[in-house]
């Protein structure tokens, strides 16, 4: 690309979804329903865990944070999508775009690490039940969640600082429905090899670390379950892990497809 095609930008255009007018109503209704269910489900879960003393356990403590992260995910993205569809204005300011991808990155890293922490929690609960309350004390749970938030902040700030150093773009049209880092880097005129390398390293490191914790935890969980003599005990142990494993599988496949 010639240098004359490169310029600094004050706003980006999100191509988003179909421009067919007949589909606008269906898209708006679809996103409203999805967003409404997501908000009510996740905030309802957080509220229920807070007001119910019997749910004040490590598993539900982590689940409340995971629910809040899921709520944040949708709130970062969906309202802007709805505004773009309704107003037919697909513009987003440079600052708004940067803030959106930064917050999205924060949520992504937090969720990956939280799922690994939850796998460790299930490992302790099933494999070492007598030591569970001591090992997963309130202070330990708070420290683990704090580490999740610290890691997400560091990882996201690295990407943010490097993205802000990009001086110019060859286009301000993003072929995506929200501001994510890979589509943004693809428009940069300057060399973004370092950005892409760090994106790959951070995503791969988080994936490998969290996957190893999850796999090792569930390997020991499986061995413990198979050694159980009680059928009822096996069923209960499997049921507490099934939903967690499903969430992990969906998230990990999505991240590997998008970033690795």
Image (tube, rainbow, N blue to C red):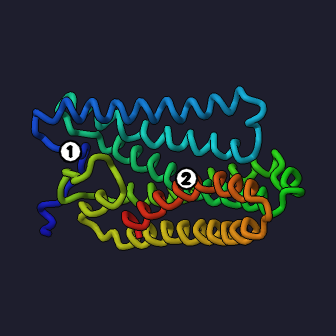
Which residue appears at 72% of the width and 72% of the height?
223
Any mark on residue 244, and which?
none
Percent of width and height locating residue 34: 37, 36
Is 66 left or right of 5, judged from the image as shown?
Answer: right
Determine the secondary structure under disc 2.
helix
Hey, which quadrant is residue 69 in on the image?
top right
Q: Mark 2 or mark 1: name the one nearer the start of the chain.
A: 1
Could you say which is closer to the camera, residue 109 or residue 234? 234
Q: Secondary structure at mark 1?
A: loop
* Label ID, residue 111: 2
User: On the rendered image, what quadrant is the C terminus found in?
Assistant: bottom left
Q: Is 83 in front, or is 230?
A: 230
| 202 sits to left or right of 51 | left
Tell me if mark 1 has few (under 14), some (14-19) or many (20+) residues whose alpha carbon lies within 10 angstroms of its own: some
Considering only vertical position in the picture, is 164 above or below 214? above
Drawn side of residue 223 relative to residue 130, left or right: left
Q: Is residue 230 visible?
A: yes
Residue 24, given in percent of the width and then of the height, sits at 17, 33
Q: Mark 2–mark 1 contact, CB under 8 Å?
A: no
Residue matched to label 1: 17
């Amino acid at each position: 690309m010639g240098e004359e095609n490169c310029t600094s930008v004050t706003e980006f255009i999100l191509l988003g979804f179909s421009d067919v007018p007949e589909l606008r109503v269906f898209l708006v209704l679809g996103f409203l329903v999805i967003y409404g269910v997501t908000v009510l489900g996740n905030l309802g879960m957080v509220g229920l865990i807070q007001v119910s003393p019997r749910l004040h356990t490590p598993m539900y403590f982590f689940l409340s944070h995971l629910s809040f992260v899921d709520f944040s995910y949708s709130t970062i993205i969906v309202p802007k999508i709805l505004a773009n569809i309704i107003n037919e204005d697909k513009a987003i300011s440079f600052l708004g775009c940067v803030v959106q991808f930064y917050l999205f990155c924060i949520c992504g890293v937090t969720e990956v690490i939280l799922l690994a922490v939850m796998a460790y929690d299930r490992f302790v609960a099933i494999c070492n039940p007598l030591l569970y309350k001591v090992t997963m004390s309130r202070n330990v749970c708070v420290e683990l969640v704090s580490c999740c938030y610290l890691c997400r902040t560091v990882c996201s700030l690295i990407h943010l600082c490097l993205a802000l150093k990009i001086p110019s773009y060859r286009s301000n049209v993003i072929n995506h429905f929200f501001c994510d880092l890979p589509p943004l880097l693809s428009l940069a005129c300057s060399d973004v090899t370092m950005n892409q390398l760090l994106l790959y390293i951070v995503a791969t490191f988080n994936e490998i670390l969290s996957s190893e914790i999850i796999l090792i935890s569930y390997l020991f969980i499986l061995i413990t379950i198979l050694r159980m003599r009680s059928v009822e005990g096996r069923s209960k142990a499997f049921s507490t892990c099934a939903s967690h494993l499903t969430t992990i599988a969906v998230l990990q496949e999505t991240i590997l497809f998008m970033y690795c």
